[in-house]
Amino acid sequence: MSTALVTDLTIFVLALLVGIEVIGKVPATLHTPLMSAANSIHGIVLAGALLIGITAHNAVGYVLAFIAAFFAAANVVGGYAVTGRMLKMFRRKAQPPAAQAPAAEAAPAQVPAQSAPDTQS
Amino acid sequence: MNTFTTNIQLVYVLAAACFVIGLHLMNSPATARRGNQVSTAGMAIAVIATLVLLIHDGSVTGIGWTVLIVGALLGSIVGLYSARTVQMTAMPQLVSMFNAVGGGAAALVAVYEYIHDESTPGGVLGTTSVFTVLDVIIGSVTFTGSLIAAGKLQGIITGQPVVFRGGQVINAALAVIAVGTGAFMFTTASLPALLILVLASLAFGVMMVLPIGGADMPVVISLLNAFTGTAVAMAGFVVGNWALIVAGALVGASGGILTKLMADAMNRSLANIIIGGFGTGDSVVATAVAADAQIRSIAADDAAIQLAYASKVIIVPGYGLAAAQAQHGVAELASLLESRGIDVSYAIHPVAGRMPGHMNVLLAEANVPYPLLKEMDEVNPEFARADVALVIGANDVTNPAARRPGTAISGMPILDVDQAKSIIVIKRSMGTGYAGIDNELYANSKTSMYFADAKKALAEMTAAVKTLVG
């Protein structure tokens, strides 16, 4: 085994343990946003997709790079956007009735939903 | 390592730290939004660092840049559009789709590295080959498996377990082919072998998820999430990038923990869920509900009287609530009761909904404050003090039969709804839940049934409470 491989494996194992430690404490209320957040984090594969570009010099390389970049970008951008949208809905207190917009318009209607009281605690 | 690559690696370490801190902040709903922002910042840093690396390297061709930029832009548009427009009831499908594209991208990275290395003498037989093969397998399985899961959740593919004769044999054969081809690829560079590996893994993904029923989806999504993370970590080994390794490991851990929590909440082993639907393997003993059991139904007015004059009400929402899009209706009834000084809370079973925590998101969307959403262990002792337990579209998770041995759900942790002084169940019919067994709760002398669609039932009850207390 090369030194680089040993280093990589060490990082992998430690990150796994850190993940178990950190995520084990997340309450059930937030499990869906947690999974969505984890989803956006694995969008880091976009970096891997971009790196294909360095050596891609033929049609096959370009096609693979294109699909990989498309997939990974959809993953990362969509993941963060939807996690943010979900977390915005979690409130400590009910909003005044005025903020109760129809379900279909949920996303834009909740933009003014502040986080001021929430972030304090 | 020269100064430039060292700096880039350090930036990746910073990004990885942001991911960990971001996940840590998810420990509380109060800080979770900041967590997502920290994580987003880490991602932006990592992507920018990669772009700087590409520019500095200088060997990306004009076509290469065009392909990457157009691909990433189109992907971003699609991702952003789905994130903005998705209904909260459809979150599990979206998460599944993100799993699919993430796993697919990771597999493509490995496929490219393999093809590329094959043309350079000795390249493919280097130390990365194990990870390349693993990345291809896990990434491809995740890709098709997640697409099937999303199809089932969306109703394009039947939510019933699709089991056909010889399915297990095909699965075993595919697994053998994939592992065998993979092992062959360690020693011999071969494009056909790569193709076989990809196809066998894609087929295995389909075959793995098809036999799994709709109620087991929370486990499947969590498992596929863990797979995606692992595939991305493998991609990190392949391209030698720490950020991918750390991020992939974090997601793998998260998916793994959620998989275990979900499987425990159903008291089923992962193997049992993967292999087949409820009651296909174990011998199911008939439940004790006699055919002549007394079932009482209740009118909206009577339900309204019970609710309006209670001092403590616990609402038990299940998938039926989500399916009827009734989360706003229940929130309206609850706030009406609260305005009369009644203590209202929600009891959420870990597997309520179609993915971990799904019910909480639906209720949050309906403007229900999160402190009212109680987890099973927290709320179970409270049922004895509740005047009314209002069960909406939840079935198996409330069945007292789980406490006795010998039933299909024996040992499954349940909500102690039968401890409440009075129980009202909103349900469309007497049909059984996913476990296919009768719910003994319905025959309880304290239980009244309200047969209607959840949305309609809640509207009727709300109206009745309003007339009653005017």
Image: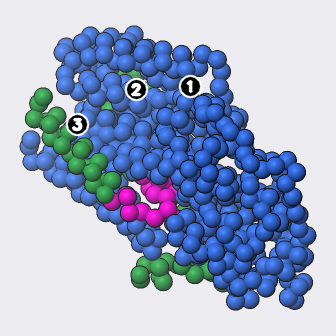
Chain colours: A green, B blue
Crowdedness of circle 3 by 10 Å Cα count: few (<14), some, many (20+)?
Answer: some
Which residue appears at 20% of the width and 39% of the height? Answer: A9
Q: Which residue is mark 1?
A: B207
Which residue appears at 26% of the width and 58% of the height? Answer: B17
Which residue appears at 47% of the width and 52% of the height? Answer: B261
Quarter of the N terminus of chain B within the rendering = top left
Quarter of the C terminus of chain B within the rendering = bottom right
Q: Which residues are magenta?
A: A22-40
Residue B37 % position (x, y)? 40, 65
Which residue appears at 36% of the width and 14% of the height? Answer: B180
**Residue under mark 1: which chain is it in?**
B
Nearer to the camera, B420 or B64? B420
Crowdedness of circle 2 by 10 Å Cα count: few (<14), some, many (20+)?
Answer: many
Nearer to the camera, B385 or B146? B385
Dot in front, 1 or 3: 1
Residue B137: which disc?
2
Circles 1, 3 touching at the beta carbon (< 8 Å): no
Q: Quadrant of residue B68?
A: top left
Identified by mark 1, the residue type is: Met
In the rendered structure, which disc, 1 or 2, sits on the residue that comes first in sequence? 2
Residue B377 % position (x, y)? 52, 66
Residue B240: which disc?
3
Q: Can residue A84 be spotted in the picture?
A: no
In the rendered structure, which disc, 1 or 3, sits on the residue that comes first in sequence? 1
Q: Quadrant of residue B44?
A: bottom left
Circles 3, 2 touching at the beta carbon (< 8 Å): no
Q: Quadrant of residue B112?
A: top left
Identified by mark 3, the residue type is: Gly
| Secondary structure category for the residue under label 3 | loop
Identified by mark 2, the residue type is: Ile
